[in-house]
Image (spheres, rainbow, N blue to C red):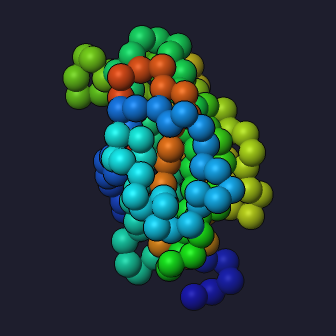
Amino acid sequence: MSRNTNKISLPSRWINVGSITAESAADLAVTGRDASTVEAIATAYIMKFSPPVPGPYAMLMRFRSDGSEDDDSVLQLYAASGDDHYHKLAQLTVVQGTQDTDTSTIHFVDTITPASEDALYDGDESDIANMIAQYYIRVLGEDRFAIICTDLDTTTVYCDVKWLYE
């Protein structure tokens, strides 16, 4: 490969990695981030997913929800490797827009506002009013991800991921 060759990601498709239908009373406590505690959280409160093997370089995330325009929910994004403890990558406030998905009752999120981002993962958001907001984050060899909702203003929040191999 020559020095002037651009790196490109292989074609990738959006994959639904889960949904959350209940909010957690609080973010993960300091004593509740070990793998066994996080893995035991009921599925209504958490989305858990893993990247394919071989591992991708990064992931692009988008969210959907079934509320009304401007309903917002707060999501906590965590990652772990092996049997190690989970650590926070970011807190994301996601705001529902008006662009329909395949149904007229579920709409794409059009605004993602990150906070408490771990700079090592290089999170970056893309959002335009009434379009589909996306959140890009490097994977850095993590083999498990978890999203916990600490403020759910709709009935359900869905997450889609596109794995990137740069």
The quadrant where residue 100 appears:
top left
- Residue 3, placed above or below residue 122: below
Name, please, the residue furthest toward the left: 103
Image location (x, y in percent) of residue 6: 59, 71
Q: Between residue 141 and residue 83, name the one nearer to us.
A: 83
Task: State the residue at coordinates (42%, 46%).
Answer: 46
- Residue 33, placed above or below residue 63: below
Q: Between residue 101 and residue 37, name the one nearer to us.
A: 37
Task: State the residue at coordinates (67%, 78%).
Answer: 4
Locate residue 160 relative to residue 60 in the image: left or right. left
Image location (x, y in percent) of residue 150: 55, 34
- Residue 76, placed above or below residue 1: above
Image location (x, y in percent) of residue 70: 53, 13
**What is the quadrant of the C terminus in the image?**
bottom right
The quadrant where residue 142 appears:
bottom right
- Can residue 164 be seen here? no
- Can residue 80 be seen here? yes
Q: Between residue 146 and residue 69, name the one nearer to us.
A: 146
Task: State the residue at coordinates (40%, 65%).
Answer: 50
